[in-house]
Each structure stands twice: as C-alpha cells, then as structure tokens.
Image (cartoon, coloured by chain):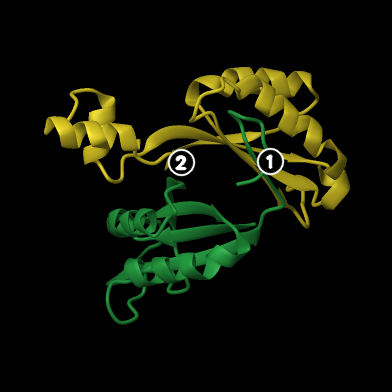
Chain colours: A green, B yellow
Amino acid sequence: MLMVRAIIRPEKVGVVMTELAEAGFPAITKMDVFGRGKQRGIRVDDFYYDEIPKEMLLIFCSDEDKDTLVKIILRTARTGDGNYGDGRVFISPVEEAYTVSTGKAGL
Amino acid sequence: MKEIMAFIRSNKVNATKTALAEGGFPAFSCRKCLGRGKKSIDPELLNLVIAVGELPLDASGESLTEAIRLVPKRMFIVIVDDEKVKDAVDIIIETNQTGHQGDGKIFVLPIFESYRVRDGSSTTDAY
C-alpha cells in the first residue's frame, strides 16, 4: 500500500480530482498548504515571495495502482511545457489501513 | 516507530483526544482537511432520477450534480512505538465508530527517525 502526496496548483485541483474520480480513484483528501520550491519562490524585482499557496492531495492506493495514479496527476496538473510551480508528487509506504465504520483492515 | 494517520469526523475530535490521553497517548497533532471517500452514486437513486426526470430536492440530489463535493474532516496524527500501534488503532476505532459510512480511515506509516528540537536527542528517547 502506498500514500501519494501531491502538492499542486490550487486552480488545478478540480481537474485533477474529476479525472481521478473517473479513473476509479474517488477517495481523496485535500488540504491547503503554503510553501516554496527549488526556485526559492517567485521573484518580483528584488522580493522573493516564498510562501506560495498550494493544495496538497493525499491519496492512498495499492502498489499496482500507483503508476496509473501518478500518470493522471502528472498529465492533468501541468500547465504547459515545464512551468515552474506546477508542483511535486511524493510517494511513501503505508503499512496498515483500517476503515473506522467497520473496523476492518484494508483499503 | 509508526505514524498513525486517522481521518475522522470533526465532532469526534474531543472524544478521541480524551480517549487517547486515557490510553496513554497524550501527544498528537490535528488539522482540518477536506476529503471524499469511496462511496459512489447509489444506482437506485440514479434509476429513480431517470424514471421521474427530475432531481430530488435533498442532499442526495445535490450530490448527483456536484462532481467534486468534499466533506470536511479532521486529520489526526499520532506517533507511537511499534508495539503500541494496535492499542492506539483500537482506541481510535472504538471512539469513532458509529457504523455509518464516513466514519473515517486510519493509516499506519513507518517513521524511520525522529528528533526532539529542544535538545537534539534522536529516535527512541526523543519520542
């Protein structure tokens, strides 16, 4: 089991989530985050704006679904040909999962 | 060490907090988030809409028209020792279970290292 953590542009959340739901990944968690990337934020004249608002999506999936999921995010969240600030996708291992309403283990 | 990440109902935060503290897990962090689960559209409802030709005027009808409607939840993070994972998960399930969809999910993730900022002590003694 894996956790896919995608940090993307706020305006792209709608497209990404619709596409994911259509591809069979309806379950998702979204939260507001602020951050900067390798480019140290956005520079306007002499000022760096280094707390840029982004949205973080958390998606839990099985190992074999990971590639499909990441491809969908990469395809839908980009804004052209390699613009800075489109976001990042991180993947971490998950050992166990439980559903509270039934108490059963598994996704 | 393991990270227990629980997505629970917002009105259950206080109960979970108390139950965890009583069970010996006083440390936690918590934040607001939005999400949706696996629940898809009820086929019966869809057939009804097709037969009648108009949307029901309640929440279920609204859910049919909104593709990306999200439910507010709380994300609860507790860091525990390996052997205490079962206890903590059981406490969370017990306090949050109402038997309905939307009670939430719990995930257990590995934590490889941890440090305490105050004195820089690491891993097991920092926790």
Q: Position of residue A29 (x, y in %)?
A: 46, 46
Per the rendering, the mark at residue B37 is 2
Q: Secondary structure at mark 2?
A: loop
Q: Compared with residue B118, is residue B58 higher up or lower down, i.e. above or below? A: above
Check residue B118 in the rendering and tell me which mark sits there, or answer none.
none
Q: In what element is the residue under mark 1?
A: loop
Which part of the image, by quadrant, shows the C terminus of chain B? top right
Q: Which residue is mark 1?
A: A105
Instruction: Tell me the kind of residue under disc 2.
Output: Gly
Farthest residue, direction front: B51
**Nearer the observer, B43 or A72:** B43
Residue at 58% from the left image edge and 19% from the top image edge? B14
Tell me the residue at 77%/18% (across/down).
Answer: B22
Which of the pair B69/A24 is nearer the observer?
Answer: A24
* The quarter of the displayed image where residue A54 is located: bottom left
Extreme residue toward the left, this view: B53
Q: Is residue B104 left or right of residue B40?
A: right
Crowd band around label 2 with a 10 angstrom C-alpha radius: few (<14), some (14–19), many (20+): some
The vertical placement of A65 against B89, above or below, is below
Q: Is residue B13 above or below residue A31?
A: above
**Front one among A47 and B28:** B28
